Image (spheres, helix red, strand yellow):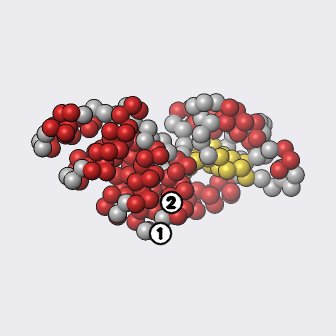
Amino acid sequence: MEVYAATANESVKYEVVTSLARPDAAPALFKIAQSEKDHRVRDVAIRTLGEAGGRKQLTMMYARADADTKRPIIVGLFNAQADEELIRIAEQEKDPAAREEILSRLRLLVVDDDPGLLALIRTTFEDVEVDVDEATTSASARALVASDPPDVMVLDVRLAGESGLDLCRELKADLRTGAIPIVLLSGLVDLEPRI
């Protein structure tokens, strides 16, 4: 940190900032991201803050950010795997460009054995440029989640074979997948007492 404070050289600052991509450096990165005058170094500090896991700091910064600063903060939040924060920001964002930036980076996994419903959900989300992956069974969904976890899942409760509720419970119990937001789809009337 002393090297960063002692230099005006942009490339030295860049090297210092990128070397700080670890959780214990999040406070220093947050300070740099807030105070750095050179926007290129500031943007790298913001993205690196995400790699260091600075979800809370980035969320606070986004609330006060101007339009030019929002984009690197969005990238930082994706680096921090802050899916819930990004979804909340997208819901509240009034700037269409910033909202589109968030939505265009989201990956959605839809798990349903009804081809018509899969097509409807895929089309709806692709219209707002959300990447959509599909699975028709719990086994194929499990394989997709294991290879590349989605940002959000839409899961049918009544899948052929294994229940969607069982898959949901399994994913929520696993530390690697427990943070993935899951929206349950059901035509069942008595679902609430079972969740």
| Residue drawn where x is 15% and y is 38% of the image | 6
Distance Cα–Cα, label 1 vs label 2 = 8 Å
Q: Are marks 1 and 2 in contact (CB under 8 Å)?
A: no
**Is residue 47 shown to the viewer in this render?**
no
Residue placed most toward the observer, 38 or 51: 38
Position of the C terminus by quadrant: top right
Residue placed most toward the observer, 92 or 114: 92
Looking at the picture, how far across and down is residue 16, in whole percent?
A: 23, 35
Amino acid type assigned to the residue bearing label 1 in the image: Lys
Left-right relation of 98 to 142: left
Position of the N terminus by quadrant: top left
Amino acid type assigned to the residue bearing label 2 in the image: Ala
Left-right relation of 53 to 1: right
35 lies above or below 63? above
Looking at the picture, how far across and down is residue 8, in whole percent?
A: 12, 44
160 lies above or below 62? above
Q: Residues within 10 Å of mark 2 (few under 14, many from 20)?
A: some
| Residue drawn where x is 54% and y is 54% of the image | 87
Q: Residues within 10 Å of mark 1 (few under 14, many from 20)?
A: few
Left-right relation of 93 to 119: left
Looking at the picture, how far across and down is residue 151, in whole percent?
A: 54, 45
**Is residue 21 shown to the viewer in this render?**
yes
Q: Element under label 2?
A: helix
Q: Element under label 1?
A: loop
160 lies above or below 175? below
Looking at the picture, how far across and down is residue 109, in whole percent?
A: 59, 46
| Residue drawn where x is 62% and y is 58% of the image | 121
| Residue drawn where x is 63% and y is 43% of the image | 135
Q: Which residue lies under the disc numbered 1?
A: 94
Residue 153, labelled with which disc? Answer: none
Left-right relation of 18 to 22: left
Q: Which residue lies under the disc numbered 2?
A: 90
